[in-house]
Amino acid sequence: MAKAFLLIYRAGVQMGESFRLPFFLTILLVLLGFGSSHATVTDRTNNYLFSGLSNSLSISKTNGSILEVKGTAATSIAASGAEGLWALDLADGTALSATSFLSGGGTLSTALGSNNLTLTYSRTDLDVVVTLTERADGVEMAGRVTPATNGPTVLALHLPATLRFTSTSVQRLIAPSHSSDGVGMAYKWLYRDWE
């Protein structure tokens, strides 16, 4: 049986040296078929590839979106939705996604390390830095949001933003739940409304 891929992310909202919100969130999103101590990060023509023995996670060089998550099957299990890699909830009631950030004049720069990839989204009023780090049990995603002094007030960072799942490729999805409902929920492949 294949090991589970743990997509671990942390979201912190930062203003200068202090956090604007008193939280540092770590959530586990479990996709199937990923996990290897022999994983690598490769710079390819159009993407960065995190790969294990029988699995892969592909990140777009153009906008940082998750292009595909593959397990033991040849088809993709999941990919980023229309929002791209991340989304922000702002205090004025609006939302800002990686996709709209880049189309609104933001820039993306990348830095590839030996076992990590840093994506820096920059604009005059806001910076978002996402670091993906290879781990023995999957890929860790850590995000930092730094608004400028006159920048927007950020209430929440969603990292990753909405994912699109190919329901025929997923056997089950285990996701966090509200604490009053339990620690999490497991959805079987028959449940087709993954989003």
Image (cartoon, rainbow, N blue to C red):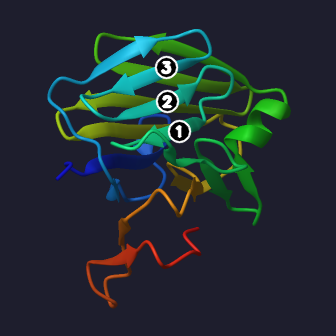
Q: Is residue 145 visible?
A: no
Mark 1 Cα shell of 10 Å, populated few (<14), some (14-19), many (≥20): many
Q: Do the residues under discs 3 and 2 have CB atoms within 8 angstroms?
A: yes
Residue 74, image quadrant: top left
Which of the two labelled residues, at mark 3 and mark 2, occupies the earlier sequence position? 3
Q: Amino acid at mark 2?
A: Ser
Above/below status of 39 relative to 45: below
Q: Is residue 43 or residue 103 the one in the foreground?
A: 43
Q: Which mark is residue 78?
A: none
Q: Which mark is residue 68?
A: 1
- Where is residue 177? Give x, y as percent: 37, 77
Q: Do the residues under discs 2 and 1 have CB atoms within 8 angstroms?
A: yes
Mark 2 Cα shell of 10 Å, populated few (<14), some (14-19), many (≥20): many
Which residue in the rendered view is the most extreme toward the right? 104
Above/below status of 113 relative to 88: above
Residue beneath label 3, please? 48
Residue at image location 79% in from the left, 41% down from the top: 100
Q: Amino acid at mark 3?
A: Tyr
Q: Is residue 106 visible?
A: yes
Residue beneath label 2, please? 58
Q: Amino acid at mark 1?
A: Glu
Which of the two labelled residues, at mark 2 and mark 1, occupies the earlier sequence position? 2
* Label 1 SS: strand
Q: Is residue 64 or residue 53 the one in the foreground?
A: 53
Mark 3 Cα shell of 10 Å, populated few (<14), some (14-19), many (≥20): many
How far apart in space, not on screen, are marks 2 and 1 (Cα)? 5 Å
- Where is residue 6? Give x, y as percent: 28, 49
* Label 2 SS: strand
- Where is residue 149? Give x, y as percent: 66, 36
